[in-house]
Image (spheres, rainbow, N blue to C red):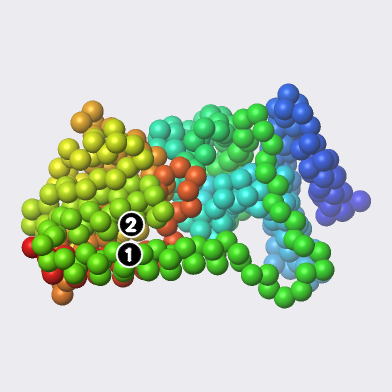
Amino acid sequence: MTQTDEFGEELADFVRRVAELKAARSASGGDLPTVLDAAIFELDHVADRLWPWYERLSATGPSRAPSGERADRQEQQLLRTVFQRFPQPVALVDRETVVRRLNFAATTFTGVRAGYATGRPLTGLLAHADRAAFRSQAAAVARGEGDRGLTVHLQQRPSVPVHATLTAVHPRGEPRTTVLVVLQPGGSTVPAAPAPAEGATGQVPDLTEATRHAALMDLLDTMTTTLLTTRADARLSRTTVLERAAHVLHGRFADWVIADTGAARLSRTTVLAPSEKEAAILSAQDPATCPLVVEAARGGSTALQIRPEDPYAFGHDENGTPVLAQANVTSLLCVPLRVEGAVQGVLTLFRCGPRLAFSMAEAQAMDTMSRHIALAMTGTR
């Protein structure tokens, strides 16, 4: 039996064991740690035996027959398929936790498409309190200090503990060690991806996107009506105009709405939060201590951030706690209110927890509303 045939048999056995692990996902909660240990063992088997074996077979020199090259490409494609179809959420990251690959189970589990996650730090999906520890453990694994495990929390599901297991792998052609990350929710199974409808023909309309678009159009109509009725009363102050606009956005569009007026010297005029206690904390904050607000007032450009990396981007409270971490902000919009280039103020909107992040379409709509708000402010005292 040739080395290639032996490798093929070993790989076929591995694929069969993966199929058995898929079937084991329905095990009771108490048996899940055993299933996870078996999955990690199989991943170690790929990293420590199958992959080096494949490298040896691939290093036979440039004189290989075309049929051998085709076989190698098929084996490589099979390994990629195994990674993508592996039943546990798995990610390949570098020592800085930047995502290289994300399998199908991981995209379902995190709710983030692989195309979006690739090239961005995996820590951006975690709660702020867990990011530093995860980076430290990933760096240690990449340095060759052994496998690590820790419990983290996804930013959009902070109440669910997630067990992360990190191990080092050495893919061919990569100059540095890559870290393999396996994620397992504590006390629950991995959510399965919805199966495509059988016999479906043509493109199925995305009802979720259609609903969001309809809600956005309704918001634009409400904002326009509010601003037109407000502008008709010239006795109102700029602060009142901005406060009314903030109330339109609060709740239906954002969990937090913070309004600051002025340009050279900003002043906090309105804070709408999930609770009055939380609103009072930011009402006392100086906008000059918020880098995002200062940058928007100076540069006059909208900032859209998904899972903000810097927890201090909106300053901190009186106890020194970062505002974005304290409020569990998962996405934000910071929009200047400008008329003919002159900034009249800044509106900042937060979405928190499991709420869907701001989309590019919503950012564009908010940019339009900001111009209308600024025009309404110029017609008042």
Residue 328 coordinates in the image, percent (x, y): 39, 40
Which residue is at the far top?
30
Residue 211 coordinates in the image, percent (x, y): 54, 63
Within 10 Å of disc 1 (Cα), the crowding (few <14, some 14-19, many 20+) is many
Between 228 and 8, the one nearer to me in the picture: 228
Quadrant containing the C terminus in the rendered view: bottom left
Residue that label 1 marks: 223
Q: How many marks?
A: 2
Q: Residue at x 76, y 38 (%)?
A: 25
Secondary structure of the residue carrying tag 1 is helix
Tell whether 136 sits left or right of 338. Answer: right
Tell whether 285 sits left or right of 28. Answer: left
Distance from Cα at disc 2 to Cα at disc 1: 6 Å
User: Could you tell me if the residues under marks 2 and 1 are in contact, i.e. CB atoms within 8 Å?
Assistant: yes
Residue 12 coordinates in the image, percent (x, y): 85, 49
Q: Which residue is drawn at 24% across and 31% down?
A: 320
Secondary structure of the residue carrying tag 2 is helix
Tell me if I can see residue 114 in this picture: yes
Question: In the drawing, what numbered circle is on residue 248?
Answer: 2
The quarter of the displayed image where residue 338 is located: bottom left
Which residue is at the far right?
1
